[in-house]
Image (cartoon, grey):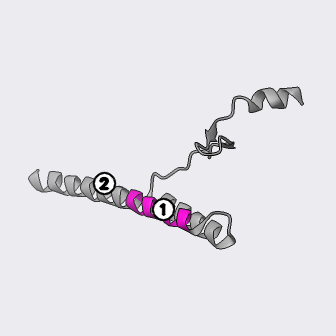
């Protein structure tokens, strides 16, 4: 039991500024591809439907995820365009 308490002391927590209570910091989420973003958006939707998270919070997360998806898409398009330009200039 003591070893569990010792290891728990080293887990990252997020402190609520208003109440001062600590909650475990969420694990890192992989958002490297459009598919990753789609999967996370679907998870947020399911949690909102189940009442696990507030709908307004889900809307904020979805807005952010949409932006991340657009960045990924723009980056992929830019890479493809550069490749096409290189082939045309050869």
58 or 84: nearer the eye? Answer: 58
- Dividing the picture into quarters, in which one does residue 8 lie? top right
Please, what is the dominant secondary structure of the magenta stretch? helix
Which residue is under mark 2?
Answer: 75
Q: Pointer 2: residues within 10 angstroms few (<14), some, or many (20+)? A: few
Task: Tell me whether the residue at label 2 lies in contact with that at label 1, contact meaning CB atoms closer than 8 angstroms.
Answer: no
Q: Tell which circle, 2 or 1, labels the residue nearer the N-terminal end.
A: 1
**Residue at point 90%, 31% (across, down):** 1
Horizontal side of 67 relative to 37 (left or right) equals left
Q: Position of residue 80 (x, y in %)?
A: 26, 57
**Which residue, as the protein is rendered here, is positioned at the far right?**
1
In the image, residue 86 above or below residue 15: below
Q: Position of residue 88 (x, y in %)?
A: 12, 56
Mark in front: 2 vs 1: 1
The magenta-colored residue range is 56-68
Q: Is residue 59 magenta?
A: yes
- Dividing the picture into quarters, in which one does residue 84 lie? bottom left
**Which residue, as the protein is rendered here, is positioned at the far front?**
18
Local secondary structure at mark 1 = helix
Q: Pointer 1: residues within 10 angstroms few (<14), some, or many (20+)? A: few
68 or 9: nearer the eye? Answer: 9
**Residue at point 82%, 30% (across, down):** 5
Q: Position of residue 64 (x, y in %)?
A: 44, 58
15 or 71: nearer the eye? Answer: 15
16 or 59: nearer the eye? Answer: 16
Horizontal side of 34 relative to 51 (left or right) equals left
Q: Is residue 30 magenta?
A: no
Q: Position of residue 19 (x, y in %)?
A: 65, 45
**Residue at point 27%, 53% (across, down):** 79
Q: Count the marks: how many?
A: 2
Horizontal side of 25 relative to 66 (left or right) equals right
Which residue is under mark 1?
Answer: 60
């Amino acid at each position: 039991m003591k070893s569990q308490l010792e290891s728990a002391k080293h887990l990252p927590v997020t402190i609520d500024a208003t109440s001062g209570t600590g909650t475990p910091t969420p694990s890192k989420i992989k958002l490297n591809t459009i598919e990753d973003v789609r999967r996370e958006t679907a998870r947020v939707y399911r949690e909102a439907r189940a009442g696990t998270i507030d709908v307004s919070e889900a809307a904020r997360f979805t807005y952010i995820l949409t932006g991340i998806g657009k960045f990924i898409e723009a980056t992929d398009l830019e890479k493809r365009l550069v490749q096409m330009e290189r082939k045309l200039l050869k």
